[in-house]
Image: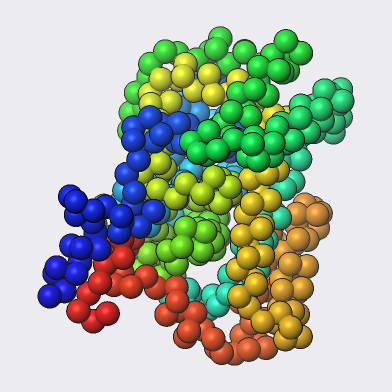
Amino acid sequence: MPLFLTRRNRGTRNGRENIHPVDEMLPAGKLFAYGVQHIAAMYAGVVAPPLIIGQALELDPLDMTLLIGASLLTAGLATLLQAIGVWRIGARMPFVNGVTFGSVAPILAIVAQHDQQQALSVVYGSVLIAGILAFIAAPYFSRLVRFFPPLVNGTVITLIGLSLFPVAIGWIAGQDSEAADFASPLRVGLGAGTFLLVLVLNRVLTGFLNRIALLIGLIIGTLVAWPLGAVDTGTFASAPIFDVPMPFEMASPAFNLSATISICVVMLVAMMESTADMIALGEIVDRPAGEKTIAAGLRADGAGSALSAVFGGFTCSAFAQNIGLVALTRVKSRFVVAAAGGVLILLGLFPIAGAVVSLVPKPVLGGAALVLFGSVAASGMKTLAKADLGDSLNALVVAGSLGIGMIPIVSPNFYEHFPAALRTVLDSGISTGCLVALALNLLFNGLRGSETSEEESTPVGSEEPGSPGTVTAGA
């Protein structure tokens, strides 16, 4: 009997209406359009780490292009691993992976201690080991999900959205406050115009066009910015048409204990953020992330990072801005993200195509990102509505967690005099806020509600991560 129930819930030839939206296969045209929209939302985040690291290494334009191509390729592979899944690897949710910005600071510290070639070798060796260790630790780390009732979930999700706002503002105003065009009327105007345009498009468009409102806004914003001189076409000068990253092409792995420890700490922080992101995404797509789903997702983080080191990339983790895109567009299919992963691989193989995506000016991208990141924060508030905030202790959990979590966001140098190992965690507002929310909830509420939350957070019959509503004999 359970066999027939399982097949019916997975969908039949005559009725696919029982398929969960996460497992819905859309027409090819929509898959591509929605996938490109995801890439537009995360492209800057993927190329920024290799750009910064490449500049610190003083790489020539060709090697810089190869480094960016490797990051795009490995982001695509890691995203496919998360969305499609292999065995018990991959969350099987619309979960985008790429190079985490948290690894930039320790990598720059490694670069400062070694010459160019040796530095890359040590970095890739450290990332390789950290990825393997994360893969092994995933099932143990995932057990933390029992400590994430709606009170903690909502607080962390809200903090994820709030912590991303400085990124969007940085894209609009610029990163260098000494630059002549920092927060110039042109940059602010483009950002504000795109922000309003995306809101209006989401309001007036319907159907498929409503789902790609962000992409339409980015295209219109770029076309407006072009005659104003805000579009940089210089990337084409050094972008080859086709290139296949080869294993350890940039450098062979070397092993250094202190460097490996620093990258392992980064990987630990990335796993913590990925856990929070998977819980947030599960709330948004109406498929709560249970322990097995989180373990599978963390395995994909570890495997993706190890694979990234082989092909010239860096530590991989979740991209929170794409969770905001899922919340904004309400397109929940994991195959859309899989399509984005496929396009990312093509961008890595055809750097000239990646140069086209890079045409979107940062102020335009920042204006659209304000809507995206606000959607994440709104999802957190929706989850908090399930918690009893009329209880003064619950309100204190939210207040204390947001207060501590916002410190590195409001003042990035607040922990400047702390030990480097602690700063890796403290400089991440998501990580510190998550830890404080967990601690305060345990202090004030103990495990009250955790068992209930765990049951709610585990999909029915989730023997395999992401199983679309499978009903088993036990259920």
Residue 408 against residue 337 in the figure, above or below: below
User: Coloring scheme of the render?
Assistant: rainbow
Side of 367 where 446 appears, left or right: left
Residue 372 visible in the shown view: yes
Q: Quadrant of residue 401?
A: bottom right
Residue 160 against residue 451 in the figure, above or below: above
Give residue 215's position: percent from left, percent from top: 56, 31
Front-lying residue, 163 or 472: 472
Q: Residue at x 41, y 20 (%)?
A: 350
Q: Residue at x 30, y 59 (%)?
A: 18
Give residue 320's position: percent from left, percent from top: 57, 50
Give residue 342's position: percent from left, percent from top: 36, 34
Q: Residue at x 67, y 61 (%)?
A: 159
Identify the image quadrant of the C terminus: bottom left
Give residue 218's position: percent from left, percent from top: 62, 28
Side of 23 where 43 appears, left or right: right
Residue 411 against residue 69 in the figure, above or below: below
Residue 421 visible in the shown view: no
Identify the image quadrant of the N terminus: bottom left
Q: How many marks?
A: 0
Front-lying residue, 252 or 35: 35
Residue 462 against residue 123 in the figure, above or below: below
Front-lying residue, 245 or 253: 245
Side of 180 where 348 appears, left or right: left
Q: Residue at x 72, y 74 (%)?
A: 398
